[in-house]
Image: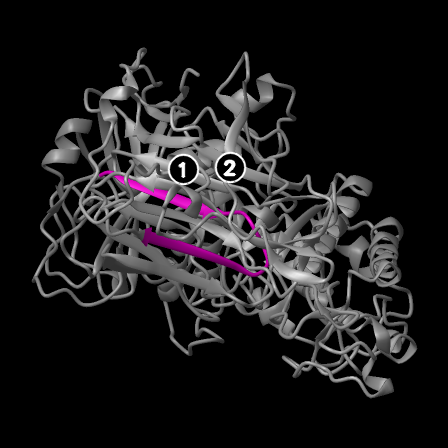
Amino acid sequence: MDPLYLRSASTSLVISFDSGEAEVIHWGADLGDALPDLAILGAPVPHSAVDAAVPAGLLPQASSSWRGRPALRGHRITDGVPGYDFSVRLRVAEVTAAAVGSSAVIVQGDADAGIRVSSALTLHDGGLLELRHTVTNTGTTPYQLDELATVLPVAPDAVELLDLTGRWCRERHPQRRAIEQGTWVRTGRHGRTGHDSSLLFAAGTAGFGNRHGKVWATHLAWSGNHEQFADSAADGRTMIGGSELLGPAEVVLAPGASHTTPALFAAYSDRGLDGISEAFYAWFRNRAHHVLPSAAAAAHGAGAGKPRPVVLNTWEAVYFDHNLTTLIELADSAAELGVERFVLDDGWFRGRRDDHAGLGDWYVDEALWPAGLTPLIDAVTSRGMEFGLWVEPEMVNLDSDIVRAHPEWIAGPSVQSYKDGGRLPLEWRHQHIIDLVNPDAWQYIYDRVDALLRENNISYLKWDQNRDLLEHGHAGRPSVHEQTLAAYRLFDALKAAHPGVEIESCSSGGARVDLGILERTDRIWASDCNDALERQTIQRWTGLVVPPELVGGHVGPTTSHTTARTHDLSFRAITALFGHFGMEWDVRQVEGVQREELKRFIGIYKEHRGLIHSGRMVRADLADDSLMLHGVVACPAGASAVTGSTAALFTLVSTGSSPAEQPGRIGIPGLDADAAYRVEAVFPVPGDADYARTFTQVQPPAWLESGATASGRFLAEVGLPMPVLNPEHALLLQVTTA
């Protein structure tokens, strides 16, 4: 059988079937139009080993003497006795490659064990590989599935591993380690993705960075319990991948039944992490349902989308203090600044004066809103803004009418409800999880949110999820798997019924950020922390996978409510710019020069959001850890662009004090080497409220006042001398074609 050879965007995948199973020969750089006879890759057989070459299977298995993690773990239950068919010997039965495009389906089976696995692979136009497996029980007795992992091999020169970790208000921070023999596993048992989840597993060559080195990276598109891992065997081969982490007997396949894994998305780059981002961004933007579909998606019938509106969220402005007069004043102030979407946060529904009560009772509180939300919605929309609303449909408080009526709708470890003597999980933020696996509970939640959307002019839902799913069960059995699927169905059904409503995935901030939830939502809230210093890191690493138009970034109060740090407006605004821009702040209190500065910056966002939300993300590799230079370059960029048009926006950020007296010359990468550009500092500038506090220098660099003109090659290789920024300040640079 001929090998399978998929190619796209300088990436290729080669799978051989010569061993009888699907063996991944290569995942990485494009290999050109023709492959040699793959028999030349026959490996030696060492001493004290199995007397045959061991394939790196698409589904690694012990029956081929793979001594690392097997892809499939499970066993058959026969006459009530578990443990049968614990080791399968999968062999290729069928390979179907698409006539157009780079996709294929590989079917492998073991008739004796009664197991068949179908693997669907697509190498998308931007080079992102999508892989998922479907296992089917072709036997005559139940088969308990314990794990079905999606894995891929990386090249021998991948010697370093980068993953991400974090906590509430400090999500997605990087950590690195050498790849050594053994298995590095990141386990998420949160019942949701988790604040500490690794958005990406990246293996690369020594010292790989933003724009250099070879990188192989994977992401598991799943919003429930999961594992991601790098498995390095004694024979020198390394696999990276992930799997859903199933609870005891969560998936037991009856004869003829099937189970499909979450998708594993995988990208290869020979240009560092920026190349990984390009592959993910292309996939997002080529989707027909993306909020701002690319030209390629539009050519296939996708709508044009609309510019990402400037948001004002009321949470850090008023918290639970909902007063119509106050909120209309806030709407007036927001509209005058140029806000385009006004979002009413937590506190509008029955009994919700604080976070102890009301969750689950999704009715407008008649005592607080005797005329409903209509007076506020009319006030907002009459001022030219959309109206958005906060909801948390997956949660309940014990102090709620719905729990008093249906205590059995709370998910937990017991068969009985807590009213009948069953045990509840410990409370988290005074709340519990509603059991969406229960069809009546699911229907109640759907009906209430559907009614809110039908009865009110709501354009946007901020959908929160403020706790982990601990001891999560349905009818006494673990059910995180089914709860996750039920939540997906809820999103999908509401989207189908209300296609014009955008949904944000918020989960105590950034605890549900993955491509599973992003297939059915329109943006994510990266963190509950609006501190600009913290957000620089959070947004940088969130943006490794998720493009900026899907990442909410807000200007918070002058003194952060989550860290008590105080920052100038320019630093907070520039930080929020490289995302879906908004504010979470009582903007009624912003006056004078600072108000004019904020209004001007909102104009800058509106002028450049088309570039920010369609361009290529560029992150410089700097030796000074206290400085960051990142930006967005127009696609395509080059000498043919109209003179004076914006080719890129960059920001220079000082995150702390530097050991050097001055930053020196810093290269500006990512531009067309042969094109001429003009670089100008555009924010803050003299006259802005905090301009004088931005710098600590006697004299600025020569170009700062009037700009600099040079080729893209000069700017990348020689760079420009940068000003001496005070710690926790930033400077916005506009690059135009000259």
Considering every residue shown, the one lying at the far bottom of the view is: 421
As drawn, is 107 to the left or to the right of 653? right
Mark 1 residue type: Gly
Q: What span is in magenta?
A: 214-231
Q: Which mark is residue 57?
A: 1
Q: What amino acid is labelled 2 in the image? A: Leu
Q: Do callouts 1 and 2 mark residues in contact (Cβ within 8 Å)?
A: yes
Q: Residue at x 87, y 66 (%)?
A: 363
SS for callout 2: loop
Q: Which residue is nearer to you in this view: 458 or 28?
A: 28
Q: In the figure, is residue 374 to the left or right of 478?
A: right
The spot of residue 676 in percent (x, y) is 21, 23
- Residue 216 located within the stretch drawn in magenta: yes
Please tell me whether the stretch drawn in magenta is mainly helix, strand or loop: strand
- Of callouts 1 and 2, the N-terminal one: 1
46 or 216: nearer the eye?
A: 46
Q: Answer with the quarter of the image where residue 350 lies.
A: bottom right
Q: What x and y, as percent, mark residue 689? A: 36, 61
**Which residue is at 29% across, 65% downward?**
728
Relative vertical location of residue 722 with respect to residue 616 in this rendering, above or below: below
Residue closest to the eye, 444 or 184: 184
* Residue 253 as seen in the image, left or right of residue 365: left
Quadrant in which the C terminus is drawn: top left
Residue 520 visible in the picture: yes
Question: Does the rendering let one see residue 684?
Answer: no
Q: How was this image coloured?
A: one colour
Residue 509 among magenta residues: no
Q: Which residue is mark 2?
A: 90
Could you give the CA–CA distance between mark 1 and mark 2, rounded to whole angstroms?
Answer: 10 Å
Tally the numbered discs. 2
Residue 265: give x, y in percent of width and height: 47, 40
Which residue is found at the position 62% from the left and 74% from the top? 470
